[in-house]
Image (tube, helix red, strand yellow):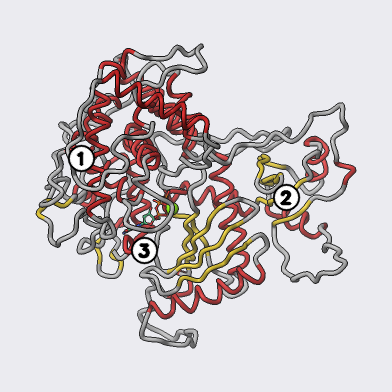
Amino acid sequence: MRFSSSFRTAMASPFTVHRLHMRGRSPVVKCLNSIETILRRSVGTEPVVAHTEGAQGDDSGEKDGPRSLSELMADRQEQAEKSVLISCPIRTSETKFLKFLSKHGNINKHFFYESYGVYAVVEFARRESVVSLLESAAIPSVNHECIVPFKSRLLSLSNQSLAASPAQQPGLPCQPQTTVSINELIQRLSTEDSVDDQIGALTEAYQLTEENSRLRFLVCSLLKDVAAAYFPECTIRPFGSSVNGFGKLGCDLDMFLDLDSISGWNFKPPKSGLSLEYQMKRTNSERHVTQSILSVIGECVDHFGPGCVGVQKILNARCPLVRFAHQPSGFQCDLTANNRVAMKSTELLYLYGELDPRVRSLVFTVRCWARAHGVTSSIPGAWITNFSLTVMVLFFLQKRSPPIIPTLDRLRDLAGPADESVIEGNDCTFTTDFSKIQLQSNTDTLEQLLGDFFEFYATFPFSRMSINIRKGREQNKPEVAPLHIQNPFETSLNVSKNVNTSQLDRFVALCQESAWLLQQGETRTQRGSSRNRTATPWGLATLLLPSKVAGIKGRKKHKKEGASQRIKSLLESLKNKNEEPKSEDA
Ligand code: GTP
Ligand code: MG
């Protein structure tokens, strides 16, 4: 989560045509079907296959249509509560390890991953098994150090008798928790047969996996155990890209400390008769309460949280937060409190992503493209944020003819009484019932959408107009800012207030260049063969290569050179890039 200034930050189309069902024989529908399958695999709507022998299986069966985010999160939280995180010696025998743990009860699921050593996530079928396991764990013996006496579900396996014999498997099968490098991705995409396939492959390579998603909920659950020292009834929920469907492996973990059950939020007092209430300290500033809570939790995490390092309390930001690294998972964590509007934006983005599989694919592609060209950055600054970029993609999809997704006003009109939500005076109401939303039958391919996205923003009148997903049409800018994207819920705010003119100019120049590149015949004809491991970059792969406009300062017109010359120089850059050390992040 960013705490920079980004955080300070149409009339609904008549959706008369029934929801577009992803069945049928046309190539577009076939392509959408395959994308949908890829996407379901990672969002967590697919029933989870238990990997453990004798496992109870997972009961998160898929209902007809997508599940609501709250249902999905409830399941994930339940899984996390029954899970433990164990650091294992690399040569541990998986079979012996499982047999050892099964003494405490059946195991639903387990997997291994690497992050400063090998770790296992183990989910038991029952919570009692976790209690039993923790009761059997010993306090570590130390020689010259002292231990901080805080027990948690983060454990270390040290018994060497569980080591695998040389005849057995060489090591534990680890699930990847980071993305492939940008160069490897370019190589992979170059072997695909169509731009649509490239977009599918990019999405599959970058999206959060089932395991990574579980790990994120487990870290929230472990942290809740720390915060429970002060607030036993608290919950810690992930939000942002960890759960909105647009998360990339390696993205930060945004967490919300939910004290609603204690803070009186949504509490209805009894109408009559005797009643008791708690005596509680009072203050006239909610912000002050949030800062105090995060301050003590920050101290607690810093002093007692196993695996939590580099704790920073950033309490004077518009949205106060505690930032730290959770070493065993490798996640960069941002813990906030009193951030309900962000929870609502998360729910809205999730809903849009689930409405049509092209939404997530296009967002992934644009996010990856933006990161490859430094349009977005993990460092706060004048860059466009991933959140803003996602809203721009949504807006573009609302502007298609016919629209691919409805406006936020339309979703609000479809809301029932249970959806009503007003947060700090802001109307955050919208339907979360997928069956009420009827989509129009737009059959644009992803290749068309990607090309048109770049063209759309290459010529968008940024100087006069604001992007507005509530109305689904551009509005006159209410204030002077190079880029104006109306905050969907806090409508007087601009989510891209931080973006300066030169960053917007770079974005526009890159859109011009990418639209042009996609139009070139070469991007279509120079396809690589899937058998050729070092295929020539084409299509989407060329868009991820270093750009000629990367250093542009002003909105200069991009000089068009011959297409073959362009590909030649792009290839040259790839060759040079391949010789550089591998970058961690795209
Ligand atoms: P990455 O972390 O970059 O992968 O994406 P993210 O969507 O998680 O973005 P970020 O961590 O910056 O923010 C977390 C969530 O906070 C977003 O998904 C939004 O729901 C919300 N958020 C972020 N920036 C803004 C903003 O400027 N205004 C509003 N209203 N919400 C924001
Ligand atoms: Mg985030």
Q: Nearer the viewer, mark 2 or mark 3?
A: 3
Other residues around mark 2 within 10 Å, as few (<14) / some (14–19) / many (≥20): some
Badge 1 amino acid: Tyr
Q: Quick check: 455 left or right of 541?
A: left
Residue 2 rendering spot, x and y as whole percentages: 40, 59
Q: Position of residue 334 (x, y in %)?
A: 49, 61
Residue linked to disc 2: 86
User: Which of pointers 1 and 2 lies earlier in the amino acid sequence?
Assistant: 2
Residue 296 shown left or right of residue 319 in the figure: right
Q: Residue at x 25, y 56 (%)?
A: 500
Does 556 sit above or below residue 266?
A: above
Whether the residues at callouts 1 and 2 have beta carbons within 8 Å, the answer is no
Q: Position of residue 214 (x, y in %)?
A: 57, 46
Residue bearing mark 3:
4
Point out the tag, 2 or 3, that comes first from the N-terminus: 3
Element under label 1? helix
CA gap, disc 3 to disc 1? Answer: 24 Å
| Foreground pick, 319 / 255 | 319
| Dot placed on the residue nearer the N-terminal end, 3 or 1 | 3
Taking the image as drawn, is residue 298 in sight?
yes
* Element class at badge 3: loop
Kind of residue at disc 3: Ser
Q: Position of residue 492 (x, y in %)?
A: 20, 64
Q: Which mark is residue 457?
A: 1
Tag 3 and tag 1, C-beta contact below 8 Å: no
Q: Residues within 10 Å of mark 3 (few under 14, many from 20)?
A: some
